Image (cartoon, rainbow, N blue to C red):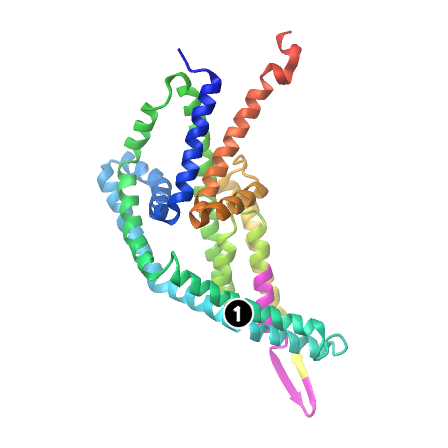
Amino acid sequence: MALPVKDQIKYWGIAMAVFLVVLWALGDVILPFVLGGAIAYLLDPVADRLQRAGLSRVLAVSIITLVAALVFILLILLVIPTLVKQTTALINTAPALFERLQAGLTARFPDLIEPESTIRQQLQAIGETIQARGGELINGVLSSAMGLVNIIVLLVIVPVVAFYLLLDWDNMIAKIDSLLPRDHVATVRHLGSEIDRTLASFIRGQGTVCLILGTYYALGLMLAGLNFGLIVGFIAGLITFIPYVGALVGGALALGLALFQFWGAVELADGDTVTYATNWLRIGIVGAIFALGQFLEGNVLTPKLVGSSVGLHPVWLIFALSVFGSLFGFVGMLVAVPVAAVIGVLIRYGLGQYRDSLLYQGQSKGR
């Protein structure tokens, strides 16, 4: 005899509450395991495909691990040092960039910005704030959970966890399936497949889109001669999973830096006359790079790699990231998207059940 619905809701509610309490209590302790599990989930289709090609699971996982290690070493040697260097340089040069903006505005609009005007003082304060906050951020990262020792621990534990989870992934799924309540096994399997489809479409697909666009933006901006092009491309690619936000934030940052770099970059002195030469072509190229990237994202990459039936609204993603990030820190931000996907699937299932119920259809259902 099945448990009453009220008892089932009570027990599942208690399980969810325990999960949230454990997530909040453990915090950064479970970070390596969350990252390892995420990596194993992302790479499981690759391992399955290699198995279908005739390789054993152990050999398939070993090949994936070797390739991932080589890629990681290349990133460490080629990309990450430059990325850190550009980030630090951008933070340190922010006041100088704002001073240059002040000088340009003062030269072109002398009546608008006086030496002691409020606008000038605000621009200077913004630059100093960015530098101060940026320095605090870097110091906080180096002295907190992302300190050197913890980074080394992550570099050691995460690959090990990912390797063993990927090796036993199919066995774990089969074990979990065997523990499902028998009265609801069909429903839970259906919801599980919907959740997996949503996560696969969004995380795997959108992750690929972020990687492609981030690489495109970084290379394009660097070839265009924009200072800090790598860090701008990294930022734009990182937040591309929120539609339009990545292009808008990255485009605004890139165009702002382009104006600082190419607006009045050359001064030609003719007696007492100083002429500011603005390289509008370079500025236009930077804008065109992001316009083309937005076109490719909306018309080629997202339809092909993500699809249109994922069902994760940008506002819902921002809300989930904000709530879980504030409650559970960095680990909360990592689990925010999967949890948002799960909740979205459950809400859609609940709405479907509601539309089929007497509460929605009323007496017309029986006619």
Instruction: Give coordinates of residue 35: x percent, y percent.
Output: 36, 46
Examine the rendering and report whether any part of residue 77 can be seen. Answer: yes
Instruction: Give coordinates of residue 217: x percent, y percent.
Output: 50, 58
Pick the front one: 295 or 329: 329
Identify which amino acid the numbered label 1 is placed on: Gln
Examine the rendering and report whether any part of residue 55 can be seen. Answer: no
Residue at x-position 46% and y-position 30%:
194
Pick the front one: 245 or 324: 324
Pick the front one: 136 or 65: 136
Which image quadrant for residue 20? top left
Quadrant for the C terminus in the image: top right
Q: How many marks?
A: 1
Q: Residues within 10 Å of mark 1 (few under 14, many from 20)?
A: many
Identify residue for label 1: 131
Furthest toward the bottom, the residue is: 271
Instruction: Give coordinates of residue 106: x percent, y percent.
Output: 70, 78
**Can residue 324 be found in the magenta stretch?**
no
Furthest toward the top, the residue is: 367
Residue at x-position 42% and y-position 39%:
21
Which image quadrant for residue 46? top left
Say left or right for 141 vs 97.
Answer: left
Quadrant for the N terminus in the image: top left
Q: Secondary structure at mark 1?
A: helix
Instruction: Give coordinates of residue 299: x percent, y percent.
Output: 56, 45
Q: Magenta stretch?
A: 252-274
Residue at x-position 64% and y-position 15%:
361
